[in-house]
Image (spheres, grey):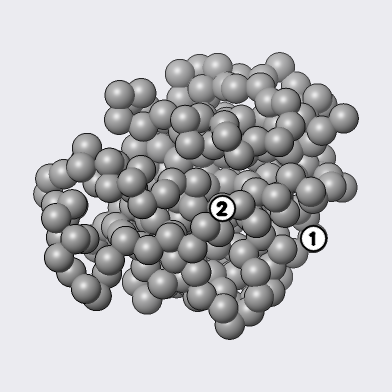
Amino acid sequence: MNRILFIDNSIDKDVYQPLTYWEPLLLFPYDFFRVSAGQWPDTLDSYSHILITGSTASVLDNTNWMQNEADLIRDAVNKGKVILGSCFGHQMIARSLFGLDAVRRREKPEIGWPEIQILARDDLLGESGSTVNGFVFHFDEVCKVAPKKATIIARSADCEILAFKLNAYPVWGIQPHFEMGIIEGIQIIDRGAGEDIPDKQYFFNCPENPPRDSGQIIPLMKAFQQTDPL
């Protein structure tokens, strides 16, 4: 029977509660663990799928709970679980499988709704050569993957690795917050307003980067949940 392990990496619940955005998209029963607060599953045996959320934390902090999460990810990959990491979760998968130097601090954050180029045909993101739009908000980025183990499947003009998939396993890392619509993205920008974060009015007044959402989350989550574990 399919069951989802929901890994919540949030730090401040007043700023970001991942389950708010993801729960309407979950088609299977799920169990929730806020690992940043020390909540962990006893075993992975009950789960077919694992969803790893974003966070206001930085993967580069490499805290104890992040090290524990890296161990969990490696174990889950070896057991053939279907895994999707979003934003921080995307970076955690890269850090867990390719080393801490697979993630770096960006010179400036990527915030907004960029045009996302699909580089390789993928069940979750669509056809090679197509483009989609979705919300991004990240200060760190994946900067390398092992080419024999993973394929880069999406990029933007400002980030070379917006998504990747492991070649031999049903495991995806995806930087954009496709689970957030335009209103949710603007709310996140408003809460985080400050140094290096543009005011929300910028996105109303800048024709080069207006909020645009392709609705990719629906085919993405359908495909993710229809994927069978190994």
Relative image position of residue 75 (x, y in whole percent): 73, 37
In the image, which disc is placed on residue 33? Answer: none
**Mark 2 or 1: the one toward you:** 2
Quick one: label 2, few (<14), some, or many (20+) residues within 10 Å?
Answer: many
Q: Is residue 83 above or below residue 164?
A: above
Q: Dot 1 lies on which element?
A: loop
In space, the residues marked 2 and 1 are separated at their CA atoms by 23 Å
- Position of residue 55 measured from the top left corner of the image (x, y, whole percent): 41, 37
Q: Quadrant of residue 12?
A: top left
Q: Which mark is residue 168?
A: 1
Give the amino acid type for the residue marked by disc 2 in the picture.
Answer: Ile
29 lies left or right of 179: right
Image point (56%, 52%), residue name? 217
Q: Is residue 94 visible?
A: no
- Name the residue nearer the viewer: 16 or 44: 16
- Residue 217, disc: 2
Question: Which residue is found at the position 65% from the left and 56% from the top?
Answer: 219
**Whether residue 218 is situated above or below residue 79 in the rendered picture:** below
Residue 57 is drawn in which quadrant?
top left
Amino acid type assigned to the residue bearing label 1 in the image = Ala
| Above or below: residue 37 compared with residue 212 | above
Measuring from the top left, give residue 64's x and y in whole percent. 47, 27
Q: Look at 55% across and 59% down and name the residue there.
A: 216
- Residue at (55%, 17%) from the top-left corner? 39
Mark 2 element type: helix
Q: Is residue 191 left or right of residue 58?
A: left
Residue situated in front as seen by the camera: 186 or 58: 186
Q: Position of residue 166 (x, y in %)?
A: 70, 60
Residue 106: quarter of image: bottom left
